[in-house]
Amino acid sequence: MMKPKVLPLVLLLVFAGIFWAFKSLGEDGKTVSKQQKILTTLGSIIEENHYDPKPINDDFSREIFKKFLGEIDAEKNILLQSDLNSLKKYETYIDDEIHGATMEFLPTLNPIFTKRQQEIASLYKTLLANPFDFTIDEKLVADGDKLNFPATDAERKDRWRKKLKYLTLERYNDLMEQREKNKGTKDFVVKTDKEIEAEARQKVMKIMDKSFDRMKYKLTDEDRFNTLINSITTFMDPHSDYFPPVEKRSFDEQMSGRFYGIGASLKEEEGGIKVATLLTGSPAWKSGEVQVGDIIMRVGQGKQEPVDLTGYAVEDAVKIIRGTKGTEVRLTLKKGDGSLKVVSLIRDEIVQDEGFARSAIIKDKNKIGYIYLPEFYADFERQNGSRSAVDVAKEVQKLKEANVDGIIIDLRNNGGGSLMDVVNMVGLFIPDGPIVQVKDREGKPTVLGDNDKSVLYSGPLAVMVNEFSASASEIFAAAIQDYGRGVILGSSSTYGKGTVQRNIPFGKPLDFASGLTEYGAIKLTLQKFYRVNGGSTQLRGVTPDIIIPDQYESLKFREKDNPNALKWDEIQKSNFKPWQATYNLATVKAASQQRIANSIPFTTIKKNAEWLAVQNDKEYNLNYQKFAQEQKSIRAAVKQNDTLSKSKTELPIEGLTADTLKYNNVDKEKGERYRAWLKNLRTDIYINETANVVNDMIGTKAVVIARKP
């Protein structure tokens, strides 16, 4: 999301109007409920301000009806088809409620849903009371999109039997592996298969008890209302969200750095706790092992028995993940490919300067500068606050003084940030000219450009991206590519987020300093970005000049994989003068493609990634022998990819003298983290290949060295 200095006038007027509306409605609260206020106000904000709002009519209502039920009963194992039949009269009524009609859908649904939850609360205890037979060949279909709602109680009971059997099988397999691994170890008690199965069921019973206790005591009608609101906002587009006050406050706290934790914001999705964002410089970010989209399965305090998070709310999960500075928290993560990974993190306060731009030098026959930029940060609160473009300029200047022959800019996993900083940063590498076009839903495109004719660096330039490079990162890569200023390398495309959102708070102010309000805030999509060549970065992202295989390539999490994403389009091309490159792109590209094709690590990673993506879409085997073999194969492929992504031969990378002094002299731990960062760079096969490409770009200036991963 881009970070503007001020809200546009229209939003300030909307904001003021909302305060007035809630004040007057609050004085006559007998006629309009709190939820009705929120629903109608958000509907009005969306219709009047969203970049491309869908018409809120009967068709819209049908989609929200389906989407919302899919959110609260994702596996379709709580409600019955008869319940849907009784609610069908509201299928075309939600749009009327948004426009001010009396709310009837949720008040009717809530008691039905509560009753069905109570029925399941009794059912799971009965099903878990007896042993499961893991020799039977049967499968669990957990994807609700592939299922209809159960027609009978018997059909629903069988779905729960299979779900509970699968949960038990996961733990049974873990316990069987522990038995095999520790067999013969002193004081280790070897249990029978029967005892292990009973222990696995008992573990699942505890999980389900906790989950249904939460449903009984913590999940409220208001939670379902919030889900309904987000069904509406995210149907408009994936990046428009509603934040109730509690979630807004929790998000702000985690992003402030004023606590001791792992530095990840979390969200509830599909019954699990998922990593929503990583705070740059935090323990989770530094580890390199925690990714956005990971599901946190269990949380352990040091060596203590981990707590299973199945059924936990975000705020409950946050409480046990946070703790005392310097203490260990162990997360069991379910990765995007389905594998489990235990990650040990040490809680700490976020150190912001470790999340800023930094550089290093690859010293070989050619001297290549490397700049890492984790996000396009900007401190708008202080006049002399940190700005990513300013910091990158400083790093470029340091590299120039070190007489580098080429520069690499690493934007992998960079989710974006300040618009003005990306504009200024492109300006470091080109003369004056347009850089990006910005368009709201009514106005003509505004062209943002660089007005400074000077060029800070004019030598060979390569930009690294991947599928997690989004928003501002895509603007930078697109501009460099359109001007022909450098070579873009990475996965088949960047994320594809070509839209901008802003937070609009509403309701009575609770805290002017933090901006918290009585009814929370809506994050709304207001604008769209376009390249100088006229094409949008939305949906399609940026296709690199050189595509390098990676292990997440085949997983479906880009913007294009969301059915509610805004469409790609194009506008008129800007007038700009392309850069006159000193290298031949076709020649450089052909040489890189040949190296990649002959690389065992890259070809194997690609093959494994494609295979893992298929496994992730399969139904779950409930036969122990088949399940265990599948898990073994998945883990082997993941481990192989992790191993292959690290080069056996280290690149000759060194930190700049000023940085070595800066990080080593501040404190011991910071120095250790800086040295660990350099060590990771030296074994990164993607930096290796990018350096080879820069060597090719340098061409006749020096001997071309092509290292093997």
Image (cartoon, helix red, strand yellow):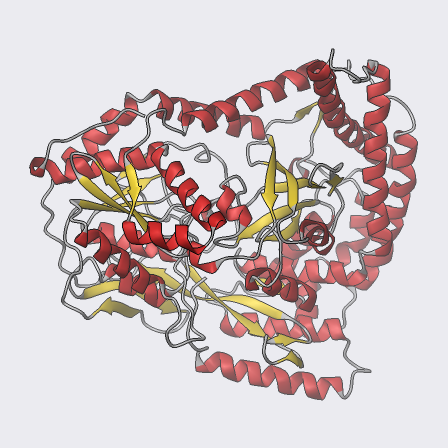
Quarter of the image where the C terminus is located:
top left
Q: Is residue 48 left or right of residue 599?
A: right
Check the image and report above or below for 219 versus 520.
above
Task: Give residue 191's quadrant in the image.
Answer: top right
Quarter of the image where the N terminus is located:
bottom left
Q: Is residue 398 left or right of residue 202?
A: left
Q: Position of residue 20 (x, y in %)?
A: 63, 87
* Residue extending furthest toward the top: 184
Check the image and report above or below for 170 versus 149.
above
Task: Give residue 23's quadrant in the image.
Answer: bottom right
Residue 132 seen in this snapshot: no
Q: Position of residue 427 (x, y in %)?
A: 22, 62
Residue in the image at 76% along x and 58% along y: 89
Q: Nearer the viewer, residue 345 or 584?
A: 345
Residue in the image at 72% along x and 54% along y: 319
Q: Position of residue 226 (x, y in %)?
A: 70, 62
Task: Give residue 193's quadrant in the image.
Answer: top right
Q: Position of residue 154 (x, y in %)?
A: 87, 32
* Residue extending furthest toward the left: 700
Check the image and report above or below for 330 versus 600.
below
Q: Is residue 191 left or right of residue 668?
A: right
Residue 444 seen in this snapshot: yes
Residue in the image at 51% along x and 65% along y: 53
Please tell me how many numbered marks the rendered image carries. Answer: 0
